[in-house]
Amino acid sequence: MSDALSRLCSELIAAGQFFHSRGWVPATSSNFSARLDAETLLITSSGQHKGRLEAGAGFLRVDLQGVSLDAGKRPSAETGLHMLMYRRDPAMGCVLHTHSVNATVLSMRMQQVALEGYEVQKAFPGVETHEGSLLIPVFPNSQDIPALAREVDAWLEANPQTVGYLIRGHGLYTWGATVADAQRHVEALEFLFECYYRQLLLDR
Ligand SMILES: CSCCC(=O)C(=O)COP(=O)(O)O
Ligand SMILES: [Zn+2]
């Protein structure tokens, strides 16, 4: 195993353990990927518990179309949602998908989540103030991942400043230039979803 591959596996394993400790990757939900080079991605294999990933069985390499480069290993069922991000941006280094309670419940009630007025919005690149709005779109869930990927791609084309999105009744996708950046974005969005949810309760 190359040094880069081993380092990225370790980073994604640690991210999974952290997310599991927070209850954001229940059962075998969620999937993670990272860029190995211009044409090659590392992604979790389908059906793994993301809090208990292991370097060997837990991951495989795929090309930019999501085709497995490691015979006998099956990539995440949602590989298409990861690959669209790497095809869009050569600087994209990591895509993380989680299934927290807050992300799931909010996605069942909201058409979009507009995060406004929170200092933690500054966790995202280019955000210098709490005064703007971070708009998190909610897409209908679908088992047709290529169709869902096309819908997300069209949204991102029109709204390139988007930092993450929700899939209804399903979970969160966010990303970054490195595993650490993407992990920070998951943590920031989960904090913001918790604040948003509690505010909704107070405002009732
Ligand atoms: C048990 S959760 C259903 C599948 C899912 O939404 C998910 O994130 C995990 O799928 P994968 O194929 O990546 O294990
Ligand atoms: Zn999922």
Image (cartoon, helix red, strand yellow):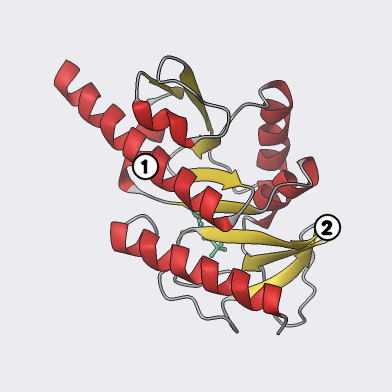
Q: Could you say where residue 143 lies in the image, as x and y percent from the top left?
A: 60, 49
The answer to whether 17 appears left or right of 178 in the picture is: left
The residue that appears at 49% across and 71% down in the rendered structure is: 13
Which residue is labeled 2 in the image? 38
The reply to whether residue 2 is visible in this rendering is yes
The answer to which image quadrant residue 31 occupies is: bottom right
Q: Position of residue 128 (x, y in %)?
A: 49, 23
Secondary structure state at the residue bearing disc 1: helix
Q: Residue at 60% across / 51% down in the picture?
A: 95
Q: What amino acid is labelled 2 in the image?
A: Ala
Give the numbered dot on residue 190: 1
Please determine whether, in this image, residue 108 is positioned above or below residue 8. above
Percent position of residue 107, x then y: 41, 34
Please state, as top left, top right, bottom left or bottom right, where the N terminus lies in the image.
bottom right
Neighbour class for label 1 at 10 Å: few (<14), some, many (≥20)? many
- Between 71 and 59, the one lying in front of the other is 59
Dot 2, crowdedness within 10 Å: few (<14), some or many (≥20)?
Answer: some
Residue 80 against residue 153 in the figure, above or below = below
Nearest-to-viewer mark from 1 and 2: 2
Could you tell whether 125 is left or right of 160 in the image?
left
Residue lying farthest to the right in this orientation: 39
